[in-house]
Amino acid sequence: MGSMAQTNRRRTSRRTIYTTLRRMVLTLELPPGAALSENELAASLGVSRTPVRESLILLAQEGLVQVFPKIGSFVSRVDPAQVADAQFLREAVELASLDDLPAELDAGLVAELRENLERQRRAELGIEEFFALDEAFHQGLLRLSGHGSAWTTVAAAKGHLDRARRLGLHETAPPVFTDQHGEILDAVLAGDTASARAAMRTHLRAVFHDIESIRAHSPELFATDSTSVPVRRNVVVWE
Amino acid sequence: MGSMAQTNRRRTSRRTIYTTLRRMVLTLELPPGAALSENELAASLGVSRTPVRESLILLAQEGLVQVFPKIGSFVSRVDPAQVADAQFLREAVELASLDDLPAELDAGLVAELRENLERQRRAELGIEEFFALDEAFHQGLLRLSGHGSAWTTVAAAKGHLDRARRLGLHETAPPVFTDQHGEILDAVLAGDTASARAAMRTHLRAVFHDIESIRAHSPELFATDSTSVPVRRNVVVWE
DNA sequence: CGAACAGTGCTTGTATACAAGCACTAGTCG
DNA sequence: CGACTAGTGCTTGTATACAAGCACTGTTCG
């Protein structure tokens, strides 16, 4: 999907619902396999089925939701194949961007990255806070090479990867990743593209490796057959 | 966006309409800037607004359509920024896949690629026929390295690039690209990753370069301000 | 007691009605 | 003759009604 900057950012019910649902799915607040009834969601939100349904259709196109006609809609289980795809995609893009770094780095962006890194080092960091900083850090690196807008596509494609990562963050502590971020940024600032590539690859693969370990712990969150219908569970949605 | 393999492939009005509209936009049968009235489309197709509207929402998320509330929906003009993003993305992905080629290539896939190349060499090839072969060729190369499913994301992101390429195909004759395809495949089959990367990069950039020249010829098809509303034209849609 | 079966409630897909607002046009007034 | 203004038709956004079908449950029959 290209950047979703097309439709005017007018405040509309659908946009609000879509954004909120998407966040809840990515943060696992809506766990993989959870049933998403259009009627229930509409009632909870005090709107009609229409904007809810349209939001679910968009989420289905992103692969975050599965819609089974006349059966139900469900938060998709984490699909290992899509996780691997997203991993390959982001690695390819982020490594390629390092080859396009300009001789003179944008000072403002560099300062932004440094400050981001400082925040990552704060001890009392929550998982979601770390995740937001991590996202901004990687996008910032892309912006350094002038490919910041390409992050939109990567971000849209890595929904399954992100959910797996959130599970993995309980395995490996953020400080490990923060240190790796530091190594990458140091190499970039030193103009050492080769080292930057190596550090980036090591970092991204470390993240990916964690996912495999979590899969053994919580296999029920992962998909085995992408066409199978999840067990209908009563998940209280939206409070 | 992940693979759109989620929702069951049940034959539904929306899926048919979405697929058809998407094809018409990508082939420029629906030119950039064309007005797409939900009511008109629904009447032409003999369905209600609902499936048409849902299709337009999906196309809007892909960036192929722009929806302006209470003004109208339009085929988006080719956005140079999105073209550049897609170019960067596909180049990163296709080059990275060459690094993951296995020692033993799948014989069936190799045969498939050879046959594809043969068909590209046929003289009486139409533009759309060449384009389909080109797509299959590049996806085939990704499948060689086991990353075939990642093509779905790339394909979804390169809508603007594809439309620009269709304009460019009138500039540079397909045979040039076909020869470049041959060079890439030869290097891959010879196990020469470095040469394959070089050939691939040359090929993809040649394609990209054509786009710049076409922009001078038909500036009205390209976007200048992505928030501006296109001039309302009477474009006869759907026959 | 077990298995087949009909019924019922829920699901999503589609059609239609209403709401709110932009844009153009025709008319009027200065 | 020009500028402003009210009106009208179109647009998309949302709400609601109906259609078709799967799944579970309770019942009934062997």
Image (cartoon, coloured by chain):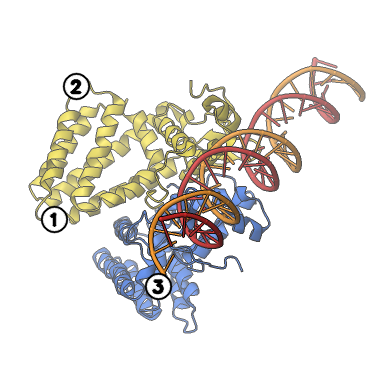
Chain colours: A yellow, B blue, C red, D orange
Q: Please give the label number shown on residue A123.
A: 2
Q: Residue furthest left?
A: A190
The residue drawn where x is 29% and y is 32% is A131
Dot 2: element:
loop
Q: Is residue A229 visible?
A: no
**Relative to A201, residue B113 above or below:** below
Number of the front mark, 3 or 1: 3
Measured in 3D between alpha carbons, the distance from the residue under mark 1 to the one under mark 2, in whole angstroms, is 34 Å
Measured in 3D between alpha carbons, the distance from the residue under mark 3 to the one under mark 2, in whole angstroms, is 54 Å
**Relative to A107, residue B87 above or below:** below
In the rendered view of the protein, which quadrant contains the C terminus of chain B?
Answer: bottom right
Q: Position of residue B235 (x, y in %)?
A: 53, 67
Callout 1: few (<14), some (14-19), or many (20+) C-alpha neighbours within 10 Å? few
Q: Is residue B223 left or right of residue B35?
A: left
Q: Nearer the viewer, residue A57 or B130?
A: A57
Number of the front mark, 1 or 2: 1
The residue beneath circle 3 is B167
Amino acid of disc 3: Leu
Q: Position of residue A196 (x, y in %)?
A: 15, 47
Q: Nearer the viewer, residue B174 or B37?
A: B37
The residue beneath circle 1 is A102
Could you say which quadrant of the image residue B110 lies in? bottom left
Dot 1: element:
loop
The residue drawn where x is 44% and y is 80% is B121
